[in-house]
Image: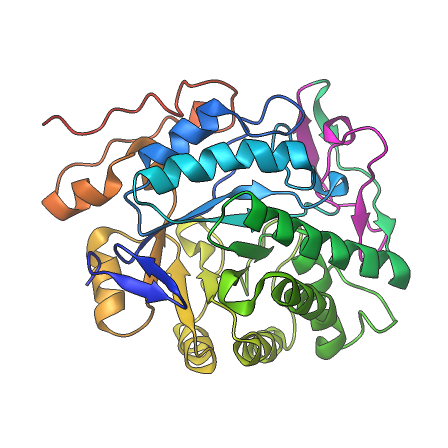
Amino acid sequence: MLFESYSAAKLPLANRIVMSPMTRSRAVDNNTPNALMASYYAQRASAGLIITEGTSPSPNGLGYARIPGLFNQEHVKAWKVVTDAVHAKGGKIVIQFMHCGRVVGQANLPSGAKAIGPTGQVLEGEMYTDAKGMQPHMQPHALSADEIAATVAEYAHSARLAMEAGFDGVELHAANGYLIEQFLNANVNKREDAYGGSAANRNRFALEIMRATVAAIGADRVGMRISPHGVFNGTGGFEGVEAQYEALVTEASILGLMYVHLLDHSAMGAPAVPDALKAKLRSLFKGTFILAGGFTGETAEKALAAGQADLIGFGRPFISNPDLVARMQKGAELAAPNMGTFYTPGEAGYTDYPAMAA
């Protein structure tokens, strides 16, 4: 099944293999995509669907060094080179909107931007910056209701720009402790207004972004990534987490989102998403369901055959295997990635991994 074609809403895919979003930190000039990034994604266009690295819909969201943005016309023109390169090879590509929120190193932000979050609680730990090395995370500004509305509007604006840039859709990153999950997670969101204090209120920000993005470009072009039980960036489990995500996914299904993308980080040491919760969320969402997290070709086939998902996401194997689809089809050995070049600028460990020998 893994190599069979599939349609996600109105988007035809050559196979059921998804290239998961992965930060690669190659947008070296003003957080703007470049020709090197176009080559990287084009090399991997045999995936049924590419989901780009996390891309900020706002200057305030550029928390990491050299991550790309999509909030102005310069970004649109640069991303259009990427989408054209992928489409020329028959691929499909959606852009992931990742607003870092409080996960910010001050030296990474452009002039005039600020760290934001549901509250002013500082994230423990440090963030790498090119200018000053490791630095403590910034003190975030707690968003007012009006500022929340403006942030929601930024997502919708960037979604419209994504259509100008030629993307096949957008993915809302509501996982891994970034801004949307900062509102979802009860360990982070200590608000006492309409955006905190209950499961429904914690879901409100995510739902407002979903609705605004759907209104901007259509539900069949919008996906969402979630990671219930994830622990990254100061999140972690909390009482009622499963019921809260069930309500969130139900609303996503009512809206008619193109897909829900469920990430299980247990392969990297985080608590597993219980199988029962995966099955429940799968049953609640009537559109395309993507599972990601530690899959091999063999385990992906089993998950598809069991009806656990429609598509399977692969992350790190795509870094060092630009022809991952062909390798899995032939049962060929996979090349190991060089972790030392995951986030460094330049082509080393990025576009220089060779395809299989003929």
- Residue 281 in the figure: left or right of residue 92: right
Does any portion of residue 355 appear in the rendered image?
yes
Q: Image height check: is 98 above or below 194? A: above
- Where does the N terminus fall, quadrant-wise? bottom left
Q: What is the image's colouring?
A: rainbow
Q: Residue at x 88, y 71 (%)?
A: 193
User: Which quadrant of the structure image shows residue 42?
Assistant: top left
- Residue 75 in the figure: left or right of residue 152: left
Q: Residue furthest front?
A: 164
User: Which quadrant of the structure image shows residue 248?
Assistant: bottom right
**Magenta stretch encompasses residue 112:** yes
- Between residue 347 and residue 263, name the one nearer to us: 347
Q: Residue at x 57, y 46 (%)?
A: 164
Q: Residue at x 42, y 81 (%)?
A: 283
- Between residue 232 and residue 351, name the one nearer to us: 351
- Between residue 237 and residue 145, name the one nearer to us: 145
Does any portion of residue 144 appear in the rendered image?
no
Residue 83 position, x and y percent, is 45, 40
Q: Residue at x 40, y 25 (%)?
A: 350
Give the total of numbered labels: 0
- Where does the C terminus fall, quadrant-wise? top left
Residue 17 position, x and y percent, is 30, 53
Q: Image height check: is 122 above or below 219? A: above
Residue 96 position, x and y percent, is 54, 49
- Residue 322 in the figure: left or right of residue 177: left
Residue 196 position, x and y percent, is 80, 70
**Magenta stretch encompasses residue 120:** yes
Q: Which residues are magenta?
A: 102-130
Secondary structure predominantly adopted by residues drawn in magenta: loop
